Image (spheres, helix red, strand yellow):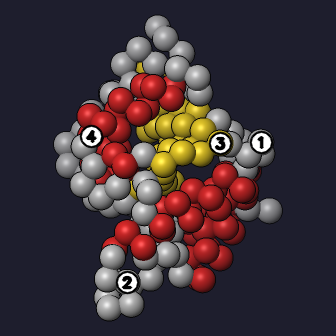
Amino acid sequence: MAATIELYLVRHGMAAERGPKYPDDRLRPLTPTGVKRFAAAVPGLLELDVVIDFVLTSPLVRARDTATLLAAGLKPKPAMTEIEALAPGGRHQAVMEAIKTHAKRHRRLALVGHEPDLGELAARLLGARGIVQFKKGAICAIDVDGATPGGPGTLRWLLTPRALRALAP
C-alpha cells in the first residue's frame, strides 16, 4: 500500500454578491465578514493538529483570498499555486491529475474551490454518488491511498467554519 495522502477540501469563504458591481464573477472578493470568519476558523485546524504541505486553489479571487488566509494561519506556512481545474466547471480528471502530480512531493494537500464542484469531488473521492454539501468556508479531511488517489477514500471529518471557530483557542 502506498503512503496515505491527506486531502483537505476547502470551500471559499463568504463572497460579495453577484451583480453589476462584479460583472466578471471571477473577480468577486471575500466580504469583510467572510475574511474575518474564515481567518478566525483557521486556528481551529491547528487545534486538530492539521499540517498542510501545499495548497492548490482556484484562480478566482474569492478562492485565492481564502487560500491565502488558510496558508497564513498554518504552521509551517505551506506554499500555494493556482490551478484552473479548481475553477467552477473544472474537469474532475484535471483535478485528479493535479493531486497526483503534487502528491509526489507533498503528502498533505489542501484544495480550495467552489460548490457544487467541491461537493462532487468529495463524493467521488469517497466512492459515493451525489454531492457532499459544503457551507462557505467549510473544510473536510479525506484520506486516500497514494496508489489510488481517486478513491475510495476515508472521510475523517467535515467541519463548518463555525465549528472550527469553536475549536480555536
As measured in the structure, the alpha-carbon distance from the residue carrying label 3 to the one carrying label 4 is 23 Å
Disc 4 marks which residue?
A: 92
As measured in the structure, the alpha-carbon distance from the residue carrying label 2 to the one carrying label 1 is 34 Å
Disc 3 marks which residue?
A: 79
The kind of secondary structure element at disc 4 is helix
Res. 8 in view: no
As measured in the structure, the alpha-carbon distance from the residue carrying label 2 to the one carrying label 4 is 27 Å
Which dot marks residue 146? none
Q: Residues within 10 Å of mark 4 (few under 14, many from 20)?
A: some
Q: Residues within 10 Å of mark 1 (few under 14, many from 20)?
A: few
Which dot marks residue 76? 1
- The answer to which quarter of the image holds residue 70 is bottom right
Which dot marks residue 22? 2
**42 to the left or right of 94:** right
The kind of secondary structure element at disc 3 is strand
Q: Residue at x 41, y 33 (%)?
A: 98
**65 to the left or right of 167:** left
Q: Which callout, 3 or 4, points at the residue further toward the start of the chain? A: 3
In percent of width and height, residue 43 lies at 72, 58
Mark 3 touches mark 2? (CB < 8 Å): no
